[in-house]
Image: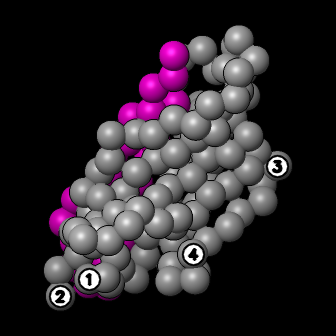
Amino acid sequence: QVRLVESGGGLVQAGGSLRLSCAASGSIFVIPVMGWYRQAPGKQRELVAHMRSRGTTNYADSVKGRFTISRDDAKNTVYLQMNSLKPEDTAVYYCNAEVITSQMRETAYWGQGTQVTVSS
């Protein structure tokens, strides 16, 4: 079993910054992809950014130039640095990891979500 634990959400004024962290633990062999999704009230969950173990990144157009994803594979941790936050960034942010477990099974796992609220 694999567990993802997120931290770093909160309330911030527009233009401010937050840094999210997500640590994976459990029966992990390797994590090919780690990333962040978000879901605003009344909207579908959407990809914010993800990063492959080889370093390739992908960002939603709405966050390009403002958000930066990074990961520390030694700690099985992914980060999301969010700068120049806007009220429309308000959402619950979920960590996602595509994990190859110690049993050599590939499974996607989700964190519990962390609230990010940006006030205008």
- How far apart marks 3 and 1 lie (CA) works out to 33 Å
Pointer 4 with pointer 2, Cβ within 8 A: no
Pointer 4 with pointer 1, Cβ within 8 A: no
- Label 3 sits on a secondary structure element that is loop
Identify the mark at residue 120; answer none if there is no mark.
2
Identify the mark at residue 60; answer none if there is no mark.
4
The structure residue drawn at horizontal position 51% and vertical position 72%, both measured from the top left corner, is: 67
- How far apart marks 1 and 2 lie (CA) works out to 6 Å
Q: Are there few (<14), some (14-19), or many (20+) residues within 10 Å of tag 4?
A: few
The structure residue drawn at horizontal position 31% and vertical position 82%, both measured from the top left corner, is: 88
Mark found first going from the N terminus, 3 or 1 = 3
Residue 68: % across, % down: 57, 67
Pointer 4 with pointer 3, Cβ within 8 A: no
Instruction: Provide the residue designation for mark 3.
Output: 54
Mark found first going from the N terminus, 4 or 2 = 4
User: Marks 4 and 3: which is nearer the front?
Assistant: 4
User: Marks 4 and 2: which is nearer the front?
Assistant: 4
Q: Quick one: 54 or 83, which is closer to the camera?
A: 54
- How far apart marks 4 and 1 lie (CA) works out to 16 Å
Mark found first going from the N terminus, 4 or 3 = 3
Q: Are there few (<14), some (14-19), or many (20+) residues within 10 Å of tag 3?
A: few
Instruction: Provide the residue designation for mark 1.
Output: 87
What type is the residue that disc 4 sits on?
Ala
- How far apart marks 3 and 2 lie (CA) works out to 37 Å
What type is the residue that disc 1 sits on?
Pro
Pointer 1 with pointer 2, Cβ within 8 A: yes
Was residue 40 drawn as part of the magenta stretch in this picture? no
The magenta stretch is 1-24
The image quadrant that residue 56 belongs to is bottom right
